[in-house]
C-alpha cells in the first residue's frame, strides 16, 4: 500500500492525525478504533483526515511505518568502519532489545497479532514496516561485514533473523504475554551481550 508523500506527513495536521491515531490504536486496537475516534483525538475533521489518508488502514500503516523507520534508523544505522564488528553488533543488540520491549513496540505488536486474522492487511503492514524492515537493514549491514572478512555467513537473511531472535530471548515473550512489564538495564544488558556472544561463535571467520 502506497503511503502519502513524506512531505505531506510533515504538515501539522498530518502530525495531529498520526499522534491521535497512534494513541487510539494502542488503546483500542485496530477494530476498536474508528475514523471518528481518530479525528476526535486528533481534533481535525474527517475531510482533513481524508486529505492525507484514503482509509483507516492507511493511517495504521503510516503510524507503524513512521515509528519503525525512526527506530530502524537509530538501531541499524551503524558505521562499521568506525568500530569493530563485536562493538557494532553490541550497540545494535542493546538498542534493538530495548526497542522491542518498549510500550509502543509491544502495543503495536499485540494489535497486529490480535487483528491479523480478521484484517490480514494489518498484519502485513506491521510485518513489512517492522520486522521485515529491521531484517533488511541488518542483512545489508551483515553483507558489509562479510565483505570485510569480519564474519563468515552463507545465508545473510537467515543470520539476520537469528540475531533478532537472540536479542529477544526470554524477555520478549514474557513482555508480550504480560508476565512482566518492566525491565532493568541489567536485564537488557544480559540478553544483548549473550546474543552477541552466541552470534559471534556461530559466524566468526
Image: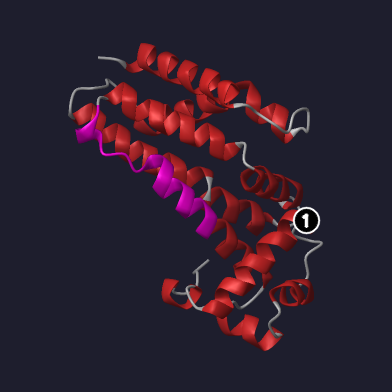
Q: Start and end of the magenta stretch? A: 66-83
**Outermost bottom residue:** 47
- From the image, which quarter does the C terminus lie in? top left
| Residue 202 image point, x, y percent | 38, 14
Of residue 81 and residue 55, the one placed in the foreground of this image is 81
Q: Circle 1 is placed at which residue position? A: 27
How crowded is the residue under tag 1: few (<14 C-alpha within 10 Å), some, or many (20+)?
some
Q: Decide: is 55 above or below 202.
A: below
Specify the quadrant of the image occupied by residue 27. bottom right
Q: Decide: is 190 above or below 34.
A: above
Report the predominant secondary structure element of the magenta stretch: helix
Determine whether the residue tagged by mark 1 lies in a helix, strand or loop: helix
Residue 119 magenta? no
In the drawing, does residue 37 fall left or right of residue 96? Answer: right
Tell me how many marks there are. Answer: 1
* Camera sees residue 80: yes
Amino acid at each position: 500500500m502506497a503511503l502519502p508523500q513524506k512531505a505531506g506527513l510533515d504538515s501539522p495536521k498530518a502530525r495531529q492525525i498520526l499522534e491521535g491515531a497512534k494513541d487510539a490504536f494502542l488503546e483500542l486496537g485496530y477494530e476498536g478504533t474508528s475514523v471518528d475516534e481518530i479525528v476526535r483525538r486528533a481534533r481535525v475533521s474527517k475531510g482533513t483526515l481524508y486529505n492525507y489518508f484514503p482509509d483507516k488502514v492507511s493511517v495504521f500503516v503510516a503510524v507503524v511505518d513512521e515509528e519503525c523507520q525512526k527506530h530502524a534508523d537509530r538501531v541499524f544505522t551503524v558505521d562499521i568502519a568506525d568500530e569493530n564488528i563485536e562493538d557494532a553488533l553490541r550497540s545494535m543488540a542493546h538498542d534493538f532489545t530495548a526497542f522491542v520491549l518498549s510500550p509502543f513496540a509491544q502495543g503495536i505488536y499485540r494489535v497486529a497479532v490480535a487483528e491479523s486474522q480478521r484484517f490480514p492487511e494489518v498484519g502485513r503492514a506491521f510485518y513489512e514496516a517492522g520486522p521485515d524492515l529491521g531484517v533488511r537493514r541488518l542483512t545489508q549491514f551483515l553483507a558489509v561485514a562479510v565483505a570485510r572478512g569480519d564474519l563468515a555467513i552463507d545465508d545473510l537473511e537467515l543470520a539476520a533473523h537469528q540475531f533478532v531472535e537472540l536479542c529477544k530471548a526470554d524477555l520478549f515473550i514474557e513482555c508480550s504475554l504480560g508476565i512482566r512489564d518492566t525491565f532493568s538495564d541489567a536485564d537488557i544488558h544480559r540478553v544483548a551481550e549473550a546474543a552477541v556472544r552466541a552470534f559471534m561463535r556461530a559466524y566468526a571467520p
